[in-house]
Structure formats: structure tokens, C-alpha cells
Image (spheres, rainbow, N blue to C red):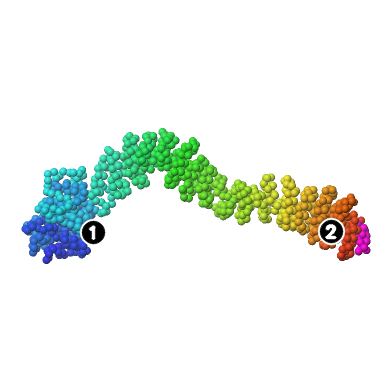
Amino acid sequence: MDLPSPHFDEQIHGYRSGHQLLSATIRLSRLDQDVVDRLSDMAGQLRPGERFAPYLTGYPLPSGEHFVLAKTWQDEGAPRSGCVWTQSLLIPIWQWVELPDIAALLPSFQRPPFEVMGIVEHTLPSDSVVKDPRRFELVEALFLEDRQPIVMFDCAEAELIALRLESALLSSIRSNFAFCTYALAPRFIEGRPFDLLFAPSDARARFTSWSGRRIDATKTGAEKSRHRWTADLVRRIFDKDRARLEVDSALGFVPEFERIDESSLRMSLRWKELVNSAAESPTAVLGLLDILRVRGRPPLDGATGIFPVIKQAATRVALEFPIDQAWMFLTALLTKLPRGRIPSSLRRHLHQAVICLVGRSPQDSLSHVVTLESTDRDTPPLVDAWIGEGLAQSNAFNLTEIWHLPSAVSSRLVIASRHLARALVDYYESHPSELGIEALTDIAQTAPSMSKRRLLRSVAARFRSDRWRALLSALMQELGWKDVKRTLSDIWLATRFDQMALNKVFIQWCDGQLEPLRGAILEFEYTPETEHFLSSTLTLHGPDIDWLSKARELSELRKISVLTALLDNASTEEIATLAGDEVRLESVFTMLANEPELTFRAIAGLLGVKGISNGHEFTIGMKVLPLLDEFRGSVLLDALLKYAMTDLAVPTALIEDLAYAFVEAGQSVDRLMEYAFRQRGSEQFVGRNLVVLCSGDSRLRAQFVSRIEPLSLSLFRWQANYGENAYIVWADLLSTAFAKDPQSATGTAFEVLQYALRLVRYPASSLVVATFPVAYQAARARERGAWPWAMSKAKWIEGDLVRAFMDSSWPPYDLLVCAMLSENPQSIFRRISDRWQGERYLVKLEEAARELPKELQMDSLRLLSHAKRKS
């Protein structure tokens, strides 16, 4: 190796009116300079005439920037005795710790500028072998025992020992190691004693207060070792050509000054010893791991060299050792290894060792676990996991025997081993057992959150039937949405969502917050089961309808499919609730109406419950009506008919068709009349309905004729203007009914006549024409029966008839017809002539008489003329 640079900074100290700095190539801090000024002088006082050979001093400066290697000569030419001349090399600390051979620096020292008289320097070559028998004690004191400052007396090889020792030191020790090869008294740096001093024997008295280690002159047996590593260290430091102590790289130390010391060296020596014995004694591996723990760093960090040793030991133990001893070793080994940080290559090897051992004897393996449990010691989780895997793979083990173990043990094994958990689920899937499934569920309910999560990820994809509902629910209790979504994927793989009991577990977990679940379901392939699952997350409540209508992930056809399913399964109360929400109801109907051919049943059900409220709904209802079966059709027909009776825009022919179909379906005419005529405040609808249903060409006219009395009751319940055509149709119905059954018509005639005579503001005279003759004749008949009250009733009818016509805008012709059809027209004409402006009204009647049939014209004109003369 090349010599160090000759241009290290240096300082020269000597006598100049006292010991002081003579020259320097570097300026130090005050603290560092004070140390150099002091330590460059003689250590202790020389006796008169005492002379010494040049000596070396090495020490670090307080700043930590430089290490000083100094050589000191005795200056006998100085004005006073005891003076010295010292050359100090200031070596940057980073260079100092890397120097392979300190002796290579000696040529950098220059002889002083004066002649040293009588002293011959005997510098031994740095590669010389140290022969001092005390070297054994020195090595033990430095490296193998508690560290203390050392003084060694009367050592002829002091410089060689110092140079060999300093060169051998570990970098972190060398950076702070202070020594002096000739000291007449203890030396200190910042209050700390030098690590190694060499002193003449006659200076022993000056070390009486020395608190450190003293190595005196050679004694008998000085070369004896008290430690098993002494001889090896002596050989490596003092016997080899180039001394250097090293820490085994398998320990993984980083060569930083503050992290490697004498204890590191001792660990390295112990490490090599154990490595060499591991081949014969696998338990030595446990000692190696203990050493790694002592380092203060995670085991195995940087210690890859130990992996082959561990692998070899584990394999040998698993194959050759008795079962109980093998388990004790592997358990201890895995306990000492860092949890979760075992390198994959080593982990695989240990894994196989445990599997092999379980395969040798599953029962003995379980006995080992139970034994540890009984002594309050647990196997490492990794061992539990591998034991469970071995049990799952073993043909010699019945899985149900796991429940014969203490519950704490079986629980640990199931939680730790995904292979065992999967094997148990697969077993009970094909061999159902309520007790076994309950045992798994109990484990899940009491397991910690992280264990539940791990167990669920292991077994969820094996839940193929609804028997796993309770276990799935227990495992999902404390999960977050991310894990729930992953579990949803597992259930999809296992069941394709055809197990509704499992699907409901997810719905229950959501606790009403179902939108994320719906979005997740939509990510899976469309199937009827997927659609059913999605539908089960929805109801007909407002927020769910809003979500469905706005879901961009759903096509219109899928929206319709889901909505149809909801409506098919909805209760009457749910439909009624929806019907009360106009906004959401319109949204539902809009979706259904897009595809009426596909949704006719749902449309019919919805309209049947809520009724039809607008023309759009009526049009859709008419489209789907032909597609329905008899039951659904009758319900929708009822709703359609109700609406048609209240909308003037519905074509009359369509109303008649609906009414006819309604009656043909077995519904009563009375119910039809209720829809058509019993709607207060809607006389326009009633009038239109009367014309449509009861006109001469209506298919239902005959049935209404037979029900003339309830029909009339419906119509004259309140006074309203139904329109002239409606009154004409009603009158025609009455006339037909009176002609068919005169006896039963009397009561109806009286009631309708009484009602009609009050409608003087409406064009209802046709009703009077139809009912007056019947009512009047009945009254006259009773008069002939000598009932006094009958006479008064006929007169009352005459009076009301005249009064109604003359107070209204009714056609005089109708009054003339009534009079001519009565048995006593002259009485009616006389009542007219007796009223104010009666003569003028008689003139109108004469004009109207010309429209009568010819057979009545002459009689009517004669009677009218007679009435005028009497007026």
C-alpha cells in the first residue's frame, strides 16, 4: 500500500522561554490547541540525569475533527532540564480510522534540529511479532473483560505493541483510543484517562492513585489464557503480518464509529463459535439468534449469512429429532424470529419443516400446542398457521377432531390458518353439521377485528349455500366498506348471488345506507339473480325511487325490470304510500310507460290501486288492457272506466265500449251508475255519460231501462244542469220504462216530475213531458177512488206544471203536449189564463199547436180559443 501523504498538517512544540508552540501548518480551536499544547510536553517529571528514548503519543482532539499522532524527543540542549521537542501530526479523523497500518506514518516524523546525545532509537519493524508474555493479559483487559484504562510497566516492546494494537482496532474504537508509549505519570484528555499507558517500573509510585488496570512486569504463567478467545485475538493482533480485528459480516453491523465496540467483537467471536457448532448441534442456531437480538437491531437485518445454517438445522430437526423435541426447537426458533419480517426464502423452508413435522404425527403436534396452552405459553401465530395447514393437508387427521381440543386452541388454529378454515368450510359444505357451523360462528363472533377480516378473506369464496349466513354476518360485523366490497366479489364467485339469505347479510350490514351496495351490485354481470339482489335493496319509498330513476348505470330496460319486480312484490300499503306521493308516482309511471308491452302487469296493478288521474295514464292503460288476464284486466278496467266517466276528452264510443265490457265482465249496472252519475259538482260529466250510456243506440240502454228507479235517484240527488240532450235521453228512458211496466212507474214518475218542475233554469222540459201524463193520470185515478187528498194532488200537479213553464224558458209546445195528454186540458189552459200575462202565453200555445199532429191540432186550438174568451 502507498504511504500516507507527507503533507498532513503538523505542529512543532519545544522550549522557548518555556514549553510552547514553535510552528504550525494549521490553526486549531482554542480547546483543541490547549490539549495539544499540554500533551506535547513530558508526562511527569524526570529525575536529575534521567534520560529516555523518543516515544509516541496518540489521542483524539475534543472537536472530533482530528486525531493527533505525536513523537517526542528529549531536548538536552535546552537551558533547563526536562525539556522536550515534539512533532504532532494532525490527521483528519476519517483518514485515521481507515489507515490499515499506523506504522506507515512513522517516516513522516523528522528528527529534531539538534543532536540527541547518547540515546539510540530501537524502532522495531511494524510487522515484527510481539513476544512480551503479558500480551495475553493485555488483550483480555482490552477486549474480553470490563473496559478500564490500562498502564503497563517495563515493556520493551511498547511502541510495537501500540502500533500493532492501534492498527488492529475496530474503526469505532480507534477513533477514541488514546495511548502513550512512555509516561512518568497518568495522562488525561478532558478529564478522561488515556486508554493505554506504558511506564518504567521506577514510575510505579506515581500511579498509586491509578484507578485503572495495572499490568506489572512479567510473571510466571503470564501467557496463560483466562478466556477461550484470548489466544485467537493475540494471534490476530500480534502474530499476523497485518493485524486487524473484524466483526463478522453476518452480524450485519454498519461500520459507524458509535455502533461497534468491544462487545461487538465479543459477539462476533461467539457468533463464529456457534456457527461452527451448528452443524452438529442444531440448537446452536438459537444462540445465534440471541446474539442478533443483542445487537439492538431487528433480528436477521443484514444477517443473510445465517440463513443456510437455520435452514439446515430446521430440516434436520423436523426429519430426525423426536416429535416433542422437534416441536420445542421449532417453537423456540420461530419465537426468536421477527414476526412478519422473516425473509421469504427462509420462511418457505421453515414452513415446509413445520408441515413435515405435522405430517409425521398430527396428534402429537396438537398435543404440543395443548401443552403450551396449559402452561400459559402460546405458539407463535405463524406456527399456528402452519400447523393448521398441515392438519388440512393430512390424510391421517379427521377435521372434526379439531373441536375436541380446548376452545382457545381450536379458535387460534382456525383464525391463524386460512387452509384449515377453508378445509372446515369445504367439509361442512358437503357434510352439513349445525354443531360444526355453530362452532365456526362462535369463533368468528369472539375473534378480534383483524382476525375476522383475515378469516373472512380466506373462506368467503367458499360460502355456496345459505347455511353460512350466521358465519358471514359474524365475520362482517366490524368491516369497513372496502372489505365488504371484496367479500361481495367472493360471494358472487361462490353463488352468483343465487343465495338470497347471504345477500341479505350485506343489506343488513348497510343499515339503510344502501347506495354503495347498489353501485357495487351493478358492477357484476347481469343475471336474474343479480337483478333480484338489486331489487331487494329497493322499496317503493321516495328515496329509492329517486335513485332508480337517476341511476345512470342502469339501462331503461333494467330500470323497468327492477321496478316491475318491486311492484309485483309490493304490499297494498306500499302501493298506497306511493300513490300518495305524486312526484315519485309520476316518476314510476314514466319509467313503466316507456315499455308498456313489457310492464303491462305492473301498470295495471299500479293504476288499479291508485286510480287514473290524467289522460296520459288513461292512454297507457288502454294500451295494456288487452294484454292482461281476466283478473288484472277487471281491476284496470274498473280504473279506466272511473277515469273515462270524468274526462270529457275521452271519446264517447270508447266510454260505451268500456261500460259494455265492464257489465259483460260481470259487474252490476248499479256500480256502473255509481261511476257515471253519482259525482257531485260534475254535471257535465254526468250529462255526457247519460247520453252515451242510455241513448237509443246504446247496447246498455235496455239494462238502464230496467233500473230506471235507481238511475233516476242517482240523477235527481241534487239539482244540476245535465244538458238538454241528457234530459231528453232520461225522458226517453222513463217513457220506455213506463210503457213496459206502467204499474211500477207511478212512484218514479211523481218523484222525477217533482224534481223536474224545480229545474226552471235548465232545459229539462222533456222530463216533464215524459212524467207528467203518468203522474197526473195516477192522481186522477185516485181522485175517482174518492180519496180527498188525491184531488188536491192532481190540482197541485196542474198548478206546478203551469207555474214552471210560465216561469221558465221551456218551449210552450211541451206544455201543450202535457195538457193534451192529460184527461182535463181545459183545466190546465184555464190556470194559464188566470195567471198574469196568461193570454199572451195562450197565444204562444196556439202557435205551438200547429206543430201537433193533425188529429190534435183542431182540439187544442178549440180549447185554447175557449180559454182565451174566458180570460
What residue is pinned by disc 2? 800
Q: Position of residue 784 (x, y in %)?
A: 90, 51
Q: Secondary structure at mark 1?
A: loop
Q: Which amino acid type is marked by label 1? A: Gly
| Residue 594 among those drawn in magenta | no
Q: Residue at x 85, y 56 (%)?
A: 797
Where 378 sits versus 825, above or below?
above
The N terminus sits in image quarter: bottom left
Q: Quadrant of residue 615?
A: bottom right
- Classify 10 Å Cα crowding around label 2: few (below 14), some (14-19), many (20 and above): some
Please name the predominant secondary structure of the magenta segment in the image: helix
Q: Residue at x 36, y 46 (%)?
A: 339
**Foreground residue among 779 and 249:** 779
Q: Which amino acid type is marked by label 2? A: Asp
Which residues fall within the magenta stretch? 856-871
Q: Position of residue 333 (x, y in %)?
A: 32, 42
